[in-house]
Image (tube, rainbow, N blue to C red):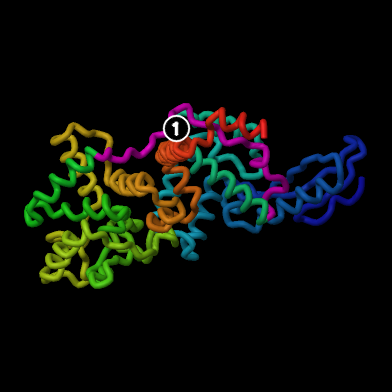
Amino acid sequence: MPKKGNSEGSVYYNKSRNRWTVQYYEVDINTGKRKRKTKDFKTQEEGKQYLQNIMYQKQNSLYIEHNGIPLTELMKSNLKLKYDTNLISDAQYIRTLEVIKSIEKSAIAFRKINSLKAEEIQEFLNSKKHLSNSSIEKIFFEFRQIFTYAMNKGYISRNPMLEVIKPRSSKKDKKVRALTVKEQQDFTNWLINQDINDFPYKNIYLIQMYAGLRIGEVLALKTYDIDLKNKRMSVNKTLTKNLKNETVMGDSTKTYAGIRDIPITDSLYEYIVEQMKIAENIEENPEKLLFKPKNKKYTNRADVNQELKRILKYNWGIKDITTHSLRHTYGTRCIEAGMQPVVLQRLMGHTDIKTTLNIYTDVLNEFKKEEIEKVNEYYLKKDLLNSSNIYEEIER
């Protein structure tokens, strides 16, 4: 029999099996003793690639600890690496960790990264069809990302995700509803009749409805972000959560495109001025917040959202509106007024125009119908489709 190689591992031809055999060693984590392992392949190249992957893995602390690299352990390790290198924020870390924890509830979570097959991953993802498309997308993204990472690190020689299809949810996508024009009128009239001293959320809701800011962006506004002379506000921060789930001031907005200047309309101007006066008269407001709550550093987004729900349900029986719906209401009115999607994209702080188009598809379709009607009216006015005119042109 040919020499089996060094103590780390080797590849040799096994005549009795008519296969190329890979031999390598692992340390039993329970006994501390070395165990010899073998695996057969049809070609020498496949065997060498497999042994190379094993050698790469054995340099990884996760492999050393678990005698292999469990799927979710590698996911968490990669997540920590991105967090430690400032590639993701505290809030992104928390959200991604929740996704990984949901995967950990399954048996597949503890399988070694190099042992998982496309069929097994597909079966797992198919079992999640009861979740929303958004939730499925997040889980699918984590799988796709971690197997790409494993390929780049040399932990696996073949990416099983290339054969995996993202399943569609059995649920209908839940769309964020905008207020109707009548609902917006009613709510606006109710708000402007409230005394700001009795109802501190008044101008928060007005800014969302008439400037399209995210709730975290509104609550992060500072008095020096407001330029009353030129009638614009600078959006450059957002309230977010840290690893302790505490509300903190973020370093930037949700996306890089979120940093933007928003015009202050004439209808909104007086309420911005009203809020500026209140903010400037607050003694303990070192950050010069436009909305500074009493006895708290920052306004809690959840409190603002719950109060909105309570008001709408109590006054008009509306149950499906959130603070994000108020931002969506602004976007909807802009499209209805004839604003081009590329302009709305910048005002809303969307990174990609596709996001704007996808969110406002229904509104754009309705707007398109109205525009086509204008074209039809023009045709009729100019008598362009008069059949007698057509026949006269043919005869000529």
Relative to 108, is 53 above or below?
below
Query: As rendered, which of 286 and 156 lies closer to the eye?
Result: 286
- Check the image and name the residue furthest to the front: 396
Say whether residue 301 is left or right of residue 191. right
| Circle count | 1
Q: Residue at x 17, y 69 (%)?
A: 285
Relative to 39, is 299 above or below?
below
Q: Which residue is mark 1?
A: 131
Query: As rendered, which of 113 and 371 lies closer to the eye?
Result: 371
Residue 296 quadrant? bottom left
Where is residue 304 shown, x and y percent of the image? 21, 49
Give the residues in magenta: 154-181
What kind of secondary structure does the magenta stretch mostly adopt? loop
Say whether residue 27 is left or right of residue 220. right
Q: Residues within 10 Å of mark 1 (few under 14, many from 20)?
A: some
Secondary structure of residue under mark 1: loop
Query: As rendered, which of 22 and 211 lies closer to the eye?
Result: 211
Where is residue 84 shown, x and y percent of the image? 47, 63
